[in-house]
């Protein structure tokens, strides 16, 4: 009888320990589940104001190419640009007057006034080879290749 009682008592103690152990596991499991959630919430709260939208600016090619009109020539004498880009001639040749006049039909869009100084610009939308001269000095030639 005594032995059985002891056995029962031991069983009850084991059961109590088991219950305690289970509730401990459940408790810590609850904690384990809660902690990452807290961390995630905390880090996402920090990440939103701390990470401004990344601005990726692709450097666009300069849409304006400058040609100097000086020393009785066009510099550079020949250039290649992309369709849609602009060429700007800057006239500055110690008071000598020049202009730019396109050759052939394709060159009709190049037709500046005669200028001693100042700028003249043309935007080239159509691919092709544009030869031009100074109407006053036909040895002054230039070429614009539009790709
Ligand atoms: Cu000229």
Image: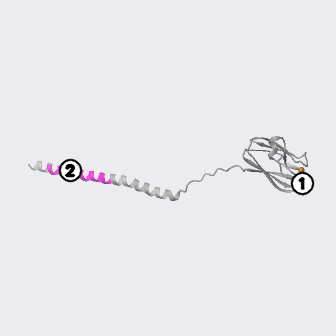
Q: Which residue is mark 2?
A: 15
Q: Quadrant of residue 125?
A: top right
Give SS at disc 2. helix
Q: Quick check: is 26 in the magenta stretch?
A: yes
Dot 1 surroundings within 10 Å: few (below 14), some, or many (20 or more)?
Answer: some
Dot 2 surroundings within 10 Å: few (below 14), some, or many (20 or more)?
Answer: few
User: Which of the marked residues, 1 or 2, is nearer the chain's N terminus?
Assistant: 2
In the image, 80 versus 128, the foreground residue is 128
In the image, 138 versus 23, the foreground residue is 138
Q: Residue at x 33, y 53 (%)?
A: 30
Q: Quick check: is 59 in the magenta stretch?
A: no
Residue 4 against residue 43 in the figure, above or below: above
Q: Quadrant of the C terminus?
A: top right
Residue 129 at x, y percent in the picture: 79, 40
| Label pair 1/2, CB-CB below 8 angstroms | no
Q: Residue at x 59, y 53 (%)?
A: 55
Give SS at disc 1. loop
Cα–Cα span, label 1 and label 2: 109 Å
Q: Residue at x 30, y 52 (%)?
A: 26
The colouring scheme, among rainbow, by chain, secondary structure or one colour, is one colour
Residue stretch in magenta = 8-28
Residue 28 at x, y percent in the picture: 33, 53
Residue 88 at x, y percent in the picture: 79, 51
Q: Main secondary structure of the magenta part?
A: helix
Q: Which residue is mark 1?
A: 97
Left or right: residue 107 compared with residue 17: right
In the image, 120 versus 140, the foreground residue is 120
Q: Quadrant of residue 37?
A: bottom left
Q: Nearer the viewer, mark 1 or mark 2?
A: 1
Q: Is mark 1 within 8 Å of ligand 1?
A: yes
Residue 29 at x, y percent in the picture: 33, 51
Q: Quadrant of residue 93?
A: bottom right
């Amino acid at each position: 009888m005594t032995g059985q009682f002891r056995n029962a008592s031991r069983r009850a103690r084991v059961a109590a320990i088991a219950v305690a152990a289970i509730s401990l596991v459940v408790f810590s499991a609850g904690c384990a589940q809660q902690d990452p959630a807290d961390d995630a919430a905390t880090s996402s709260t920090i990440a939103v104001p701390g990470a401004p939208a990344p601005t990726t600016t692709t450097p666009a090619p300069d849409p304006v190419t400058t040609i100097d009109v000086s020393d009785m020539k066009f510099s550079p004498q020949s250039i290649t640009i992309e369709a849609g880009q602009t060429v700007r001639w800057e006239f500055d040749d110690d008071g000598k007057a020049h202009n730019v006049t396109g050759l052939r039909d394709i060159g009709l869009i190049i037709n500046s006034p005669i200028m001693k100084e100042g700028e003249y610009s043309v935007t080239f939308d159509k691919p092709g080879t544009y030869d031009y001269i100074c109407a006053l000095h036909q040895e002054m030639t230039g070429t614009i290749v539009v790709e």
